Image: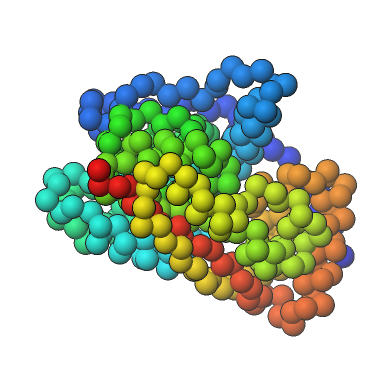
Amino acid sequence: MIGHSRPTIRSGLREHTRPTIGSGIGEDPKILSINPRANIEIPLGTDEGKKHARTWQSSEHFTEVSSQYETFRELDLRAVHIISELLAGAINQRCPVVRLLDVGTGEGRYLDAVSESLSASLANRVLPIGVDLSPAMLTQAHVRNRHVGLGSQYLVSASEKLPFLTASCDAITSFNAVHHFDLARFVSEASRVLIPSGQLVLYTRTPEQNRRTIWGRYFPEFATRETKLYHRSDLQLALQADGVLDSIRVQMIPWKITTSLSRLIEQVVHFHYSTFRLYPSDLLREAIDTFEYRVRQEFSDMERITCENDHIIVMAKRASS
């Protein structure tokens, strides 16, 4: 067996300032309503306090992995294509500017990819806006965006209190992030911020899909320790709850990835998923060894391991009146 230890997190990763916000948002009264606050004082003994504590722990995780996140997470290009086509067909092309908001944007890869695709297919100017609770992740988004040149804007904000005016965004997306949100409060805010007939698109994984991944199948307790993922029915019911969203659809996105054992193990020790932080360090080392043994038993070529990484897309439209 290969010996593994939890990687040392450099203290410098914790030293981030809030990214500079570009004038595209800050000077547009049609979009920005308030200055977002990432830290909200809530008594930790309450249910809200417990939710807030979990949210803060998640933010700390992304602070620590921000500089390496892009290296260890794959981009689902098929999903980008499907979502871009969906939005392009739904957006009013007579509007000069399309405001695309990505919630839980992280380092902005999906926001950049969808924005680039929309810019190529629409005559409208696309204004990409990303919000995230982690200033560290948004710092990485700024670094990426300087090279991409899409003019994306970023704000530190919780998903449950979006700092935008009512009916100010044409479309809202969220990629691999909704399980970190208070779902009901996020849906309420998204419904408020969307223009009439605006589109909400969620890309996520269900618990059932999680169990079929290589982690769910071979990494000890991975599927049982990850309890935040929403079932398909949970998402549909949340979108239907207040009657503001309609035309709710769910599409399965099959996705097979080919990887290597060494990369898989590297993803664990660098906390590719926040789920790996739920293991005490000694149990994580044992789980890695068990995972390696199981993978070697199941696959013949450790350099070409093909496995399922399926997701779903949940789409809804804000009612026109």
Query: Would you identify the image quadrant in which residue 122 lies?
Result: bottom left
Query: What's the residue at 73%, 44% (across, down)?
Result: 277
- The location of residue 188, given as percent across then percent down, is 43, 37
Please indicate whether residue 261 sits to the left or right of residue 259 in the image. right
Count of numbered tags: 0
Q: Give the farthest residue toward the bottom.
A: 300
Q: Is residue 113 visible?
A: no
Q: Is residue 45 visible?
A: yes
- The location of residue 208, given as percent across then percent down, is 65, 63
Q: Nearer the viewer, residue 5 or 212?
A: 212
Which quarter shows the N terminus? bottom right
Query: What's the residue at 47%, 22% (across, down)?
Result: 37
Please indicate whether residue 96 sits to the left or right of residue 204 in the image. left
Q: How is the image coloured?
A: rainbow
Query: What's the residue at 45%, 49% (across, down)?
Result: 240
Please indicate whether residue 133 sits to the left or right of residue 145 in the image. right
- The location of residue 136, given as percent across then percent down, is 52, 34
Judge whether 75 appears above or below 59 on screen: below
Judge whether 13 appears above or below 121 on screen: above
Q: Nearer the viewer, residue 31 or 306?
A: 31
Q: Nearer the viewer, residue 309 or 165?
A: 165
Query: Would you identify the image quadrant in which residue 265 lies?
Result: bottom right
- The location of residue 80, given as percent across then percent down, is 39, 61
Query: What's the residue at 41%, 31% (across, down)?
Result: 162
Which quarter shows the C terminus? top left
